[in-house]
């Protein structure tokens, strides 16, 4: 089977699994314990992983807060900022095409009296910096939360410009970067207005069940305050209590190291594979297909394609023995895509849409399968 659902999850890299195994077997210590060797080795392994992830992202190692994944990170940051700084009374600005873990969190806060501004997007799912600036001027928000790269259509938002605006107005800025890590090169030091970032290891060839919230410091020695989502033993600088999953953290760190070392070649290959697939689909289906995404300023390797007159669920079932695809986000698979709806697609168009999400670990010959698809 050809696996083309990498925006849902990725296959764990062999090097990642090898790095994890000792911490599932003989190195089982709790890094919060003291003095004895098992605990000290676990503590050292966590620190090394933290440093590798910080190197990949361009932040300080003590700004990495381990979570169970981007969904928890998004909840933790948005709820934590709202409660600590706004008491659910100050506005949060977001967009209509965010991941469900952002939108549902905002709707929850809205039910508690927190004003939420949902910015509309263009036909490719992007918000403009001018929209963000106007909304900031009108509402004096406590937080702006805007997805970096869309998980369904691949569109990249102008994060650098939005970061600059938020810095100018002294507004905290959060971005869900789950889909862009490893596929788009960036250095957080170049985005001084970007206070918070969310990501998951399993989107970058690491294990499931582990992710991070990056919480930038206010200054060199002053940590940003938020209300913790999980209270308890005070791990992770009091941001997120609970015993650390050392094996998963080690795997996350190894995945970050691998991604960092091969980012340029992976991105180039994804772009080449995407163009190859676009050429095959365009040649084979002609005007029977429509691309929902544009082909510039996007995450390489993500395509959203309408097959006119073909129900996407029936198509996926028919293809399932041969190829793994999806209709959109795996996190809201039971509902019509809110992203496609927000960019103006009708229900019929949404029900004809399939998402392709490629991996640099496949070859062009794998995509030749679609040359014979009718």
Image: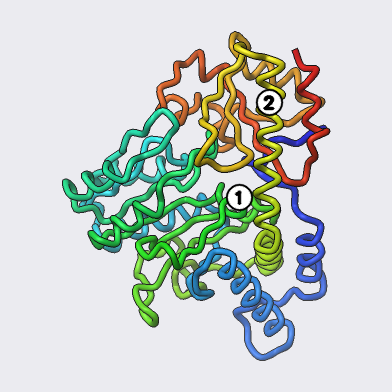
Q: Looking at the picture, does residue 261 appear above or below residue 286? A: below
Q: Nearer the viewer, residue 106 or 120?
A: 120
Locate residue 95: give its quadrant: top left
> Quarter of the image containing the N terminus?
top right
Name which of mark 1 and mark 2 comes first in the sequence. 1
Is residue 194 toward the left or the right of residue 311 in the image? left
Q: Name the residue under label 1.
A: 183
Is residue 6 toward the left or the right of residue 225 in the image? right
Q: Name the residue under label 2.
A: 279
* Residue 296 x %, y %: 52, 37
> Quarter of the image containing the C terminus?
top right
Identity of the residue drawn at 73% across and 87% down: 37
* Residue 105 x %, y %: 39, 45
Q: What element carries label 1?
A: loop
Identity of the residue drawn at 52% across and 67% down: 58
Residue 107 in view:
no
Residue farthest toward the bottom in the current orientation of the protein = 35
Residue 95's disc is none
* Residue 237 x %, y %: 46, 75
Is residue 124 toward the left or the right of residue 39 in the image? left
Q: Looking at the picture, does residue 273 appear above or below residue 188? A: above
Give the Cα separation between the discs numbered 1 and 2.
21 Å
Q: Nearer the viewer, residue 331 or 163?
A: 163
Total residue callouts: 2
Q: Residues within 10 Å of mark 1 (few under 14, many from 20)?
A: many
Identity of the residue drawn at 66% across and 20% down: 282
């Amino acid at each position: 089977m050809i696996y083309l659902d990498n925006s849902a999850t990725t296959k764990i890299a062999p090097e990642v699994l090898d790095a994890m195994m000792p911490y599932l077997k003989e190195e089982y210590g709790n890094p919060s314990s003291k003095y004895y060797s098992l605990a000290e080795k676990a503590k050292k392994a966590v620190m090394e992983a933290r440093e590798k992830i910080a190197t990949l992202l361009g932040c300080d190692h003590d700004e990495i807060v381990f979570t169970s994944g981007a969904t928890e990170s998004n909840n933790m940051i948005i709820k934590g900022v709202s409660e600590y700084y706004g008491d659910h009374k100050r506005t949060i600005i977001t967009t209509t095409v965010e991941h469900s873990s952002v939108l549902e969190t905002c709707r929850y806060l809205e039910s508690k009296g927190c004003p939420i501004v949902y910015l509309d997007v263009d036909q490719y799912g992007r918000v403009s910096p001018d929209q963000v600036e106007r909304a900031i001027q009108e509402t004096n928000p406590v937080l702006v939360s805007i997805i970096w790269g869309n998980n369904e259509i691949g569109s990249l938002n102008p994060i650098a410009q939005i970061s600059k605006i938020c810095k100018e107005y002294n507004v905290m800025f959060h971005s869900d970067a789950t889909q862009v890590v490893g596929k788009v090169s960036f250095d957080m030091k170049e985005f001084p207005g970007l206070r918070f970032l969310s990501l998951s290891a399993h989107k970058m060839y690491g294990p499931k069940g582990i992710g991070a919230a990056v919480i930038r410091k206010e200054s060199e020695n002053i940590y940003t305050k938020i209300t913790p989502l999980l209270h308890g033993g005070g791990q992770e600088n009091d941001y997120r209590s609970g015993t650390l999953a050392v094996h998963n953290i080690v795997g996350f760190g190894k995945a970050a190291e691998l991604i960092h070392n091969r980012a340029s070649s992976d991105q180039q290959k994804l772009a080449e594979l995407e163009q190859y697939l676009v050429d095959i689909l365009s040649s084979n289906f002609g005007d029977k297909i429509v691309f929902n995404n544009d082909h510039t300023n996007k995450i390489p390797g993500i395509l959203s394609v309408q097959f006119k007159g073909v129900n996407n669920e029936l198509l996926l079932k028919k293809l399932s023995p041969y190829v793994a695809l999806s209709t959109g986000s795996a996190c809201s698979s039971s509902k019509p895509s809110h992203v496609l709806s927000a960019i103006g697609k009708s229900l019929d168009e949404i029900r004809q849409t399939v998402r392709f999400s490629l991996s640099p670990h496949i070859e062009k010959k794998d995509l030749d399968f679609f040359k014979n698809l009718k």
